[in-house]
Image (tube, coloured by chain):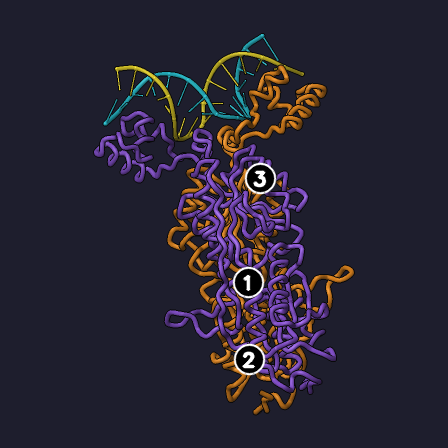
Chain colours: A purple, B orange, C yellow, D cyan
Amino acid sequence: MARGAVNLKRLSQVLGLSPTTVSRALNGFPEVNEKTRARVVEAANRLNYRPSASAASLATGKARAIGHVVPLAEHMMINPHFSDFMAGAGEVYAQFGYEMLIKVVAREDEADVYRDFASRSRVDGVVVHGPVTNDPRIPLLNSLGLPFVVHGRCDDLASDYSWLDVNNRRAFCRAAEFLFDLGHRRIALVNGIEAMNFAGRRRRGYEDAHQARGVPLDAGLMFGADMVEPYGYRVARKLLESADPPSAFLVASVLPAMGVIRAMGELGLKAGTDVSIIAFDDDLSFLQAPSEGGGRGIPFFTAMRSSIREAGRRAAEILLERIDAPADAAPRQELWEAELVIGTTTGPLRQSAGGRRAFRV
Amino acid sequence: MARGAVNLKRLSQVLGLSPTTVSRALNGFPEVNEKTRARVVEAANRLNYRPSASAASLATGKARAIGHVVPLAEHMMINPHFSDFMAGAGEVYAQFGYEMLIKVVAREDEADVYRDFASRSRVDGVVVHGPVTNDPRIPLLNSLGLPFVVHGRCDDLASDYSWLDVNNRRAFCRAAEFLFDLGHRRIALVNGIEAMNFAGRRRRGYEDAHQARGVPLDAGLMFGADMVEPYGYRVARKLLESADPPSAFLVASVLPAMGVIRAMGELGLKAGTDVSIIAFDDDLSFLQAPSEGGGRGIPFFTAMRSSIREAGRRAAEILLERIDAPADAAPRQELWEAELVIGTTTGPLRQSAGGRRAFRV
DNA sequence: TTGTATGCGTTATCAT
DNA sequence: ATGATAACGCATACAA
């Protein structure tokens, strides 16, 4: 407690009431006299009284905090996608009087943190980030009895836990079909790390579209790595300078897509004309132009878009809902469809783009 | 407490000892018999005992948590700079057994959150982000008696609080001088929001260099806004298509610098040859190429570099140090120099670049 | 070296 | 409608 902070006892002495009544008045119990409540609330505000978090937590068994465990090693999480998700979740937590508690730890210590959270009752629930297939965290959390929600999914059966996911497979299938409809046949896939469950789904969507159109897959056009800018740059340089370059790119994030743009700029190629790009767009805030006069301008990237910030908000809501629900309540599962947004980076296949190309480097 | 979790009383009963002795054994008190301690530690591990956070906090008055308040409105904070800083700070917190507590709130509610933190003793200290000149948070936190450290500075006198900052003025002066040395005279400044204290310092550094070289300032070349990608793009398009374009850009972050690159690509201009770019590089993880075989490759941007993640680590260390120090200990202040890194985006002024230019669009 | 008793600031139970 | 009293789980001053 801060020096001189007023506690329940002091406040009740000032009011000439018992601590019990003051507590009830402040916590909205119906039995307390409205005149008394008004007096109490006024005095509490005036003296700047706030109940001690640890004392309340000890008495109620509720921490009023949500935990997020961030793997240290893979910087997958320490990136713009993650911070936008957290911003959304944080809004909801603040709104409902919850704290957001973040723990940055090595992958191998993650299980330990969950055990710690549970047995020390530091948090009332956790959000699971970056699920892999058959993620061991799900059975662990279930056995700990700690409420949780997964951002993404771990498997196709996904029935015994709550999750919120984007229909990645369908999004990438639609994106590829959109490019096929424009006449493109050689489409590079610049995917995320395939060990991540979401990246596997995205690849399958890409494959679905190829199969539906009878276009054979070319392993030389498929890449998977951490979704950073230089990755897109490297892949694009390599492919666009090769003998048989793709005419379009399907990119898992606007970050590597920026890298593709950079590579094209260096090679004198214009996006949407010489080469098409469609990206998965998490609606990251740092890539959005400040909206002038309401609404957003014409987007740069053609993209499958789904706001990761909105996902953060909704995931938080689902989790808070589950925390208040009975322990045996049915899990909540939501699958969002990404929206196709037409920007400036896609266009019909140019005949000249098929064969060799005169670079303007 | 989680269902069935073992507490101190149960553990002591199992061991046939008093709770006091068990507590002492676990907390490393010197007076306890080593054989007893061994027994206690073994049993604690076996039964997976962990002290309740709220009970410990209530008893000791320490929360073992650090607060970070993130303004919701300006997405300045919900961006890659912020998440990298947090990653660094989080590492240190985890190492010392602290939690990181993040609160996303509207600017106008920020003061309230600090009061809340203090009076509810939810945290032992806070990190102040994005200081403006004469920031009201500093006197508030001082009056609350809540230990804090500022990432950045609020004024030039900056004596009554702890801070960690980069020498922004000197960094931008050096960057501009580097461009002057290459023969450039018309250098665009793509700065952050000038209300932020750091951006003001950067502008002054840019002005220092102009004055030192006797180059007059051109208000038409100086911009300030939120450091997002489209901002750099917009400014670069506008300037490079103007009658008297700059031959070089000094950019406050690699994010808008990517936008400058995009604009140049569209205009058929090559960085380092046609136009030079030097950026302030916070060493953001998502822009770093995965190091192949140790070390990092040749950087893309010529830049003044200072790792914001490292700053997060150090800020956390300073704060934890202050929390343990006596309340009247002298504030700790550190000013870091950014490092000049030569990349591929700068080169000597081309004679042809001065006048009109043939665009290859 | 170990144990007893008390306090930390709430909420909740049971009276009145 | 209000009050006395007992938890909550730990740490610690004091006693032995």
Q: Quadrant of the C terminus of chain B?
A: bottom right
- Residue under label 2: A347
Q: Of the residues shown, which amino acid type is indicated by label 3? A: Leu
The answer to whether A216 appears left or right of D15 in the picture is right
The answer to whether B136 appears left or right of A127 in the picture is left
Q: CA distance from mark 2 to mark 1?
A: 21 Å
Disc 3: host chain: A
Place of residue B273 in the rendered image (x, y in percent of width and height, measured from the top left): 66, 82
Disc 1: host chain: A
- Residue under label 3: A141
Q: Please tell me which residue lies in front, A169 or B264.
A: A169
- Tell me whether the residue at label 2 lies in contact with that at label 1, contact meaning CB atoms closer than 8 angstroms: no
Place of residue B248 in the rendered image (x, y in percent of width and height, measured from the top left): 59, 79
- Residue under label 1: A170
Residue that appears at 64% across and 50% down: A133
Helix or strand or loop: what does disc 1 sit on?
Answer: helix
Helix or strand or loop: what does disc 3 sit on?
Answer: helix
